[in-house]
Image: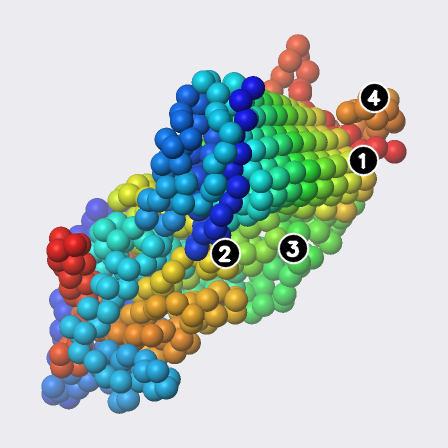
Amino acid sequence: MAKITLTPTKTPTLRLEAENICPDSFAGKSNEEIANLHVFVGKESQALGDYFEIAGESGSTAAETTIVINGDVNRVKYIGMKMSAGEVIINGDADMYVGAWMSGGKINANGSVDAFSGLGMTGGELIIKGDAGNYLGAAYRGDWRGMQGGTIRVSGNAGSDVGTFMRGGTIIIGGNVDVHVGTHMEGGTIIVKGDAKSRVGGQMVKGDIYVFGDIEVMMPGFQYRKDVDSEVDGTTGSFALYEGDIGERHGKSKGETIYGKLYMKH
Amino acid sequence: MSRSWMRLRSLRRSAYRQVGNLAKIVTDVVCPFCGTLCDDLEVALDDSGEKILEVYNACAIGAAKFLHSQAEDRLTRPQMKQEDGSWKEVTYDEAVEYTAQMLIDAKKPLMYGWSSTSCSAQSVGSELGEVVGACMDNTATVCHGSSLIAVQDVGIPSATLGEIANRADRVVFWGCNPAHAHPRHMSRYSIFPRGFFTGKGSKSRKMVVVDPRRTDTAKMADIHLQLEQGHDYELLSAIRVAIRGEKLPKTVAGIPAETIYEVAETLKSGRFAVIFFGMGVTQSLGKNHNIDIAIAVTRDLNDYTKAAIIPMRGHYNVTGSGQVWGWQFGFPFCLDLSRGFARYNPGDSSSNDLLIRDEVDAAFVLGSDPGAHFPVGSVRKIAQMPSVCIDPHITPTSAVSKLHVPVAFVGVEVGGCAYRMDNVPIETRKVVEPPEGMLTDEEFLTMVLKRVKEMKGAA
Ligand code: SF4
């Protein structure tokens, strides 16, 4: 796999919009061509090379391209947005929309990422060592399709609105989450290893949510069913199974109503 | 709204009525203050027809708006802030020049406000914003923006205030206090009017108020749900469960289950239920989700009866701003036009986030006062950047801006279209002339747009 390294050379005034930092854009291009790819500061179009020193080389296809960013890009938006293959390694913090709408490949963010990361993603892996901001794996405004496939794994904490309108894939949060987890969820799995504040599974139609820690305020539309033993992301344990959100619409399968499932670890 | 009613209204636009030989009365005046947009005001002018003597039918805050325009010490020419902090009078042409240059020089100017002006001014503003690649936002961003997000997420079953007056027999005020914020709302539309199917006025209606505080509106209610602060989402969810007759925990948000079942039954048993909601629920924890689930409650109720939900919009034409941008750009607020096409994502393209995250480098404010309504951190940022404030009044925003451009009062000194909280457009009226030589905001915007085009053409 070909490796190309970007080292930040200057901090943008305002924020940098750099959707071109993506294996799909880099593939098959010379370093000079890559340096000339556009980035935006407000209405001004500038060159990627104005902000990064570029070394190594990119592969001929996205799948053969690894982009390594060495340094903080916490004022750079859209890294790895819409990527379909290859790898992006971020050795620092990144701004909003990391891996938004990604469909394949892998992003390793070794720092933290801001809001809207993994928005509407359909495939691939998004690994975050630090914390994630709000709307992780959620839907873009007005879209009924949040995350639909792939995996998001966060070692730290996540903000509010994790997996809003989620329909597939898996989100694993090592730490705690803020309010609204899996709101309007219609499929997929969310695992929270720490605590959740409130509004877990509100308006949930279908899907699975696991919470290992506490939920400060439980939604009134969830009803206890039974205890179950299961293995969740390498941890075996006994869970209390709740079903809901009772107030929401639900489909039927073989004559039985299918609810969203919320598992609380004992 | 029926056609014949509309015809009746236009016939009544008789304009001036002579009272004795003292004052002239202008009838059918529209109040340019709150989103209720009352259209039955009468204004008494002196003999010359230049001075407002009295405002009839308006509530106190509405009347004050008209009388303020008459203040003796009113600013009538633009003022530029000097190095030493003092203000110097400049001409409108100089103000146009500064504004045009600022918008062109900025990489990402913020153009904020737009809620207290006419739709035609908003429309000129949109064109200007598009030409200079601005981020455009209106006061919904700190008010009912969360409602707009929810509507986009799940749609909205709504109605006009006319329908409410004539039909609604179950009225819920959730997180709003019309007794103070929209003083004539209850008398004109929601509680007291005797309509076609609500002939007994307030006696034909059951009123439910949901508010953690015992407000003056709550004191009038048949049922007051005094919920714990910040638990609106849970309570609304519980009402959905109760509507379906499912089991509830003993209490939700501090309200006993029996009361929640009772409210659900009250709403279901009505012929027409309406939920009015305000900033107590749009700006408390969960924001758009609270509205989203309130809309879900409304939808659920439609399985049993007719139900609608209406936001209590604050500024008289914040609704119009969303309408104008909606048809011009596809989004009602938080517009980012910097890259030549419209983008929208509150949380990213919302004014406060843009300011706090240092994403904008100039501020243009028209028809709003962020200096009074934004968090201190945001206001400080505005104070640090090139800035223009277009406002008839001296405000906290004009005080921190580099240039203050006073303009005529829309709805008092110049007419123009505004949208009521229920999205009904109403043409406001001109009652008196503005002070000699003063521009309207639409005229000023048109001059800036022309100058910007000249500058860009020359570049
Ligand atoms: S209720 Fe609103 S629109 Fe009506 S008179 Fe009062 S301030 Fe004006």
x and y percent of residue B309 in the render? 46, 46
Query: What amino acid type is highlighted by mark number 4?
Result: Ser
Packing grade of label 3 (10 A; few <14, some 14-19, many >=20) is: some
Query: What amino acid type is highlighted by mark number 1?
Result: Phe
**In the depicted view, which residue is nearer to us: A124 or A178?**
A124
**In the depicted view, which residue is nearer to us: B430 or A111?**
A111
Q: Is any part of residue A201 visible from this angle?
A: no
**In the depicted view, which residue is nearer to us: B306 or A163?**
A163
Q: Which residue is mark 4?
A: A230
Does residue A245 sit above or below A53 in this rendering?
Answer: above
Q: Secondary structure at mark 2?
A: loop
x and y percent of residue B243 in the render? 62, 37
Query: What amino acid type is highlighted by mark number 3?
Result: Gly
Locate residue A13 relative to residue B388 in the image: left or right.
right
Q: Which residue is mark 1?
A: A212
Marks 2, 1 in one chain: no
Q: Which residue is mark 3?
A: B230
Q: Are marks 2 and 1 in contact (CB under 8 Å)?
A: no
- Measure how far apart labels 3 and 4 are at the Cα level: 35 Å
Q: Which circle marks residue B243 in the picture?
A: none
Does residue B402 sit above or below B47 in this rendering?
Answer: above
